[in-house]
Image (cartoon, rainbow, N blue to C red):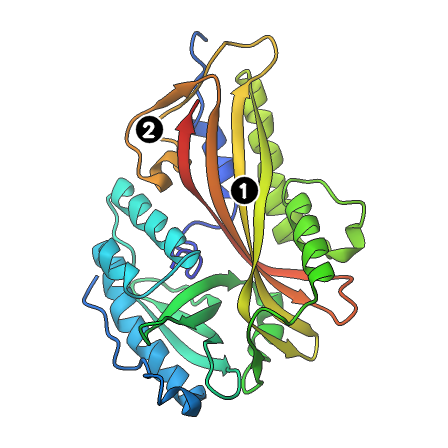
Amino acid sequence: MSGRRSVRSRRGPAPMTSSAATALTLLALAGCGGQPVDAAAPGPAASAAFGAERAALVLTAFDQADSAASVSGDVEALRTQEVAPSLNLSIAAVRRAAHNQRPQPAFQHINPVFAVPTGGPSCFLTTATLRLTGSELAPTDVSQFVLGPDGQWKLSHNVQISQPALVAARSIGGRPATSGGTALDETSRRALAAEVFARSIGSTTSNRSLVASSPLLDNQFAGGWEVYGQQLAGAGAAVKRTMDRAEWSDCAVTVPAGTLTFLTVHATDTLSPAPGGPATVRMTPQSPDLIATGQRAALSGKAIRVTRVQTFLLLVPAQTTGTTVLGLNDTALTAAAG
């Protein structure tokens, strides 16, 4: 689960390593697991009784199946346990592990707490500590599971969170979640998505107070993007990132500090030669973005476009202003030369 564990974004590298590391190896300018376990998935008749105890069964079954699939690198088994955007991150993590010839560690969620909508829920949220085989690290993650039309629960969102976010994240325990993506009004959703994206590339929408400054967003993520651009400029290339669309998670939960919810941003990076530079731009097979997309051959052209998905866990105060980014993930999805 690519955001889920520190070794792999939940299975992956720390946020922004893709862009920052990509700049080191990415560009050369031309001319210059196991079987799925679904016993915990309730059928339609059982859904009305679904609560924290049933959610715990779902999480336990998921750990068994998804951990085995992650360790073995079984993408088809992962598809039985996850949906996008989490699945995108997990597949990218499998590809990185194969490239590095180092299997991902097995994992288990311990001491979980849950926020489940009342009635017959179609989603729920959970926060737990991750036990990683062979590691002294014990990161905490926040996940959303969604109920598919076939009656099986699958992971849809997941990020690891830092120590300062633990209190807010664990405060979801026992609180009813809201479903249907209606926790925030449309105006707030649009403004927050625009500002989060702008800040992720070191800019702003002129409404900077909407999102609080943080080392994770402004230093690590936006800072990595800035370094990426500088390194490409040094190689005679340029990059521009645009937001294609934003999506909000089905479930959210109100805690004393605000509303906890996931934001997913779909973006496109366009790489091109800088003015006065070579006529084409090239991506090497060692590029982290090419590895994530599963491509083994270099790309070269007048432009290269990389689509990517980014997941942000937000804590939105009642007045919206001062929203905090508690965790995030980022991975490339496709890369094509044009």
Q: Nearer the viewer, residue 258 or 233?
A: 258
Task: Assign a secondary structure to mark 2.
Answer: loop
Quadrant placement of the C terminus: top left
Q: Quadrant of residue 57?
A: bottom left
Q: Which mark is residue 285?
A: 2
Q: Position of residue 304 (x, y in %)?
A: 46, 26
Residue at left offset 47%, top offset 39%: 307
Could you tell whether 246 is left or right of 95 in the image?
A: right
Residue shown at the point (47%, 81%) measured from the top left:
121
Is residue 249 visible in the rendered image? The answer is yes
Residue drawn at the location 48% of the way across and 81% of the way down: 113
For the point 45% across and 80% down, the residue is 112
Which quadrant would the N terminus be assigned to in this image? bottom left
In the image, 238: left or right of 120?
right
x then y, percent, for residue 15 = 51, 49
Please name whichever residue, 306 or 203, is drawn nearer the observer in this view of the structure. 306
- Name the front one of labels 1 and 2: 1
Residues under numbered marks 1 and 2 in contact, where contact means CB atoms less than 8 Å apart: no
- 66 over 292 or under it: above or below: below
Residue most toward the bottom? 49
> Amino acid type of disc 1?
Ala
The residues bearing labels 1 and 2 have C-alpha atoms spaced at a distance of 22 Å
- If you read the primary sequence from the N terminus, does the residue marked by circle 1 or circle 2 appear first? 1
Describe the element under mark 1 as helix, strand or loop: strand
Query: Relative to 45, is 130 above or below?
Result: above
Q: Residues within 10 Å of mark 2 (few under 14, many from 20)?
A: some
| Quadrant housing residue 226 | top right
Q: Is residue 48 left or right of residue 266?
A: left
Mark carried by residue 316: none
Which residue is tagged 1? 267
